[in-house]
C-alpha cells in the first residue's frame, strides 16, 4: 500500500469507529508500518485539515470528529451478514475495497447489541474457497478510479498473440462477461468504441484529462446473444 492509499485508509478506519479511539500501535499493525510512520501520517492529515484529535495517556489514541461519522443505523443482524456474504463473494468486482470500507462503517454505526448479534451470526456462515484457475483477478484500482472520475486512461493492451499496443481511451462502462471484466471505452487510437479485457491491460496510467460526454447508444458493444444489464439502485 502506497502512502496516499494508506492516508485515505486511516481516515476511513477512524471514521468507521468514531468517536472511539484507535491507537498508533493498532494502526501500525493494521497497515504494516512503523509507529513513527503512523505518527507522520496523522500529522500530515491534521495539517491538511482532517479533524483528527489525539487523546494522550495509557489508553489514548486517535479519533475522528464524530460529526464525520455515520448516525446509528437500524440494520438487522441478517441484513448486515447478507451484505458481508455478498461482498466476500464479490472480491473481483468494481469498488470491492470501497465495499469493505462501507461494511466497516455500517457495523461501527449499528447499536452495539445489533453489531454483536451480526458478528455472532456471521460466525455461522462459511464460504468454500474457489481454487479454479479460471477465476478472474480483481479490477485494478486505476481502472476503477478512471470510471468513477470520468478521466482518460492510458495503458498497454496485449492481444491474444502477445502483441502489445498503446491505448488512450475514454472509459465508459465496466462490463462482466464470460471472459471476466471488460472495459467499454471510446478508443482514441481507433477513433471508435472498443472493449478491452481488464486482465490484458498493462502499465496502466490515470491521466488528468477529463473525457467529453459520451453515451452508450453510440457504442457497438459487439456482444451478440447476450443481454446487457446495467446496475441500478432501488
Image (tube, rainbow, N blue to C red):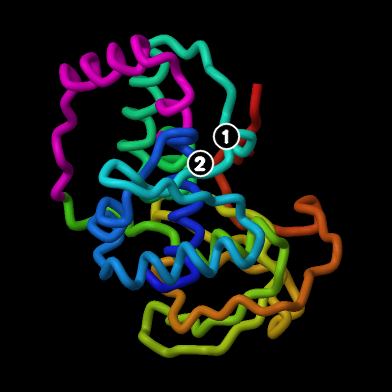
Q: Residues within 10 Å of mark 2 (few under 14, many from 20)?
A: many
- At 37% from the left and 48% from the top, the residue drawn is 61
Q: Which residue corresponds to mark 1? A: 66
Q: Check residue 103 in the rendering and tell me which mark sits there, or answer none.
A: none
The percent position of residue 25, horizontal first and vertical second, equals 25, 56
- At 64% from the left and 28% from the top, the residue drawn is 233
> In what quadrant of the picture does the N terminus appear?
bottom left
User: 96 and 68: which one is in front?
Assistant: 68
- At 14% from the left and 34% from the top, the residue drawn is 128
The percent position of residue 139, horizontal first and vertical second, equals 44, 59
Name, please, the residue furthest toward the front: 57
Secondary structure at numbered mark 1: helix
**In this rendering, is residue 53 above or below 110?**
below
Q: Which residue corresponds to mark 2? A: 15
Magenta span covers which residues? Answer: 104-131
> On the picture, is 144 further left or further right than 92?
right
- Asked whether residue 183 is drawn in magenta, I would say no
**In this rendering, is residue 21 above or below 36?**
above
Amino acid at each position: 500500500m502506497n502512502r496516499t492509499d494508506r492516508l485515505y485508509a486511516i481516515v476511513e478506519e477512524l471514521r468507521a469507529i468514531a468517536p472511539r479511539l484507535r491507537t498508533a500501535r493498532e494502526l501500525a499493525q493494521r497497515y504494516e508500518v512503523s509507529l513513527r510512520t503512523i505518527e507522520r501520517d496523522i500529522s500530515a492529515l491534521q495539517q491538511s485539515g482532517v479533524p483528527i484529535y489525539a487523546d494522550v495517556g495509557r489508553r489514548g489514541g486517535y479519533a475522528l470528529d464524530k460529526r464525520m461519522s455515520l448516525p446509528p443505523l437500524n440494520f438487522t443482524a441478517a441484513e448486515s451478514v447478507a451484505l458481508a456474504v455478498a461482498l466476500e463473494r464479490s472480491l473481483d468486482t468494481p469498488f470491492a475495497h470501497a465495499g469493505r470500507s462501507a461494511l466497516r462503517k455500517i457495523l461501527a454505526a449499528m447499536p452495539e447489541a445489533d453489531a454483536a448479534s451480526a458478528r455472532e451470526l456471521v460466525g455461522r456462515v462459511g464460504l468454500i474457497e474457489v481454487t479454479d484457475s479460471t477465476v478472474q483477478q480483481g479490477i485494478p484500482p486505476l481502472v476503477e478510479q478512471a470510471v468513477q472520475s470520468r478521466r482518460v486512461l492510458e495503458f498497454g493492451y496485449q492481444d491474444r498473440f502477445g502483441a502489445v499496443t498503446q491505448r488512450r481511451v475514454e472509459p465508459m462502462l465496466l462490463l462482466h462477461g464470460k471472459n471476466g471484466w471488460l472495459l467499454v471505452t471510446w478508443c482514441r487510437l481507433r477513433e471508435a468504441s472498443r472493449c478491452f479485457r481488464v486482465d490484458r491491460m498493462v502499465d496502466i496510467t490515470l491521466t488528468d484529462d477529463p473525457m467529453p460526454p459520451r453515451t452508450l447508444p453510440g457504442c457497438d458493444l459487439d456482444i451478440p446473444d447476450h443481454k446487457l444489464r446495467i446496475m441500478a439502485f432501488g
